[in-house]
Image: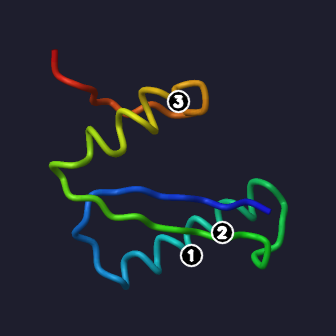
Amino acid sequence: MPHVILKMVEGRTEEQKRALADALTRAVTATLGCSEDLVSVAIEDFKDEEWMARVFAPDIQQRSDTIYRMPGYGPEG
């Protein structure tokens, strides 16, 4: 029962979010061989200025062992 949580900077329309949820569902079912009724998708929007503190640090940097594709950006310094 895959549950996908997508976090992104705000600014996308509800139509874009629904299309993305549908595309993610298709990718999950095709890759894992499960039915669509087992897949759930959540989308969480964040303000750009919140991203590094609320998403990058806790979800990417501090949980790097769970990340299968690292982003091409990081904290300045």
The reply to whether dot 2 and dot 1 touch (C-beta < 8 Å) is: yes
Q: CA distance from mark 2 to mark 1?
A: 6 Å
Residue in the image at 46% along x and 39% along y: 59
What is the crowding at mark 2: few (fewer than 14 residues within 10 Å), some, or many (at least 20)?
Answer: some
Read off the residue under disc 1.
22
Local secondary structure at mark 2: helix
Q: Which mark is residue 50?
A: none
Residue in the image at 33% along x and 64% along y: 45
Indicate the position of residue 63 as horizontal and vertical percent values.
52, 30
Indicate the position of residue 75 as horizontal and vertical percent values.
23, 25
Read off the residue under disc 3.
63
Read off the residue under disc 2.
26
Residue 12 or 23: which is nearer the viewer? 12
**Closer to the camera: disc 1 or disc 3?**
3
Indicate the position of residue 10 as horizontal and vertical percent values.
25, 65
Indicate the position of residue 21 as horizontal and vertical percent values.
53, 72
Q: Is residue 28 left or right of residue 66?
A: right
Position of residue 12 relative to residue 4, above or below, is below
Mark 1 belongs to which amino acid?
Asp
What is the crowding at mark 3: few (fewer than 14 residues within 10 Å), some, or many (at least 20)?
Answer: few
Q: Is the image coloured rainbow, by chain, by secondary structure, or in one colour?
A: rainbow
**What is the total number of numbered labels drawn onto the structure image?**
3
Mark 3 belongs to which amino acid?
Arg
* Mark before the other along the chain sequence, 1 or 3: 1
**Closer to the camera: disc 2 or disc 3?**
3
Position of residue 48 relative to residue 73, above or below, is below
Quadrant of the drawing holding the C terminus = top left
Mark 2 belongs to which amino acid?
Arg
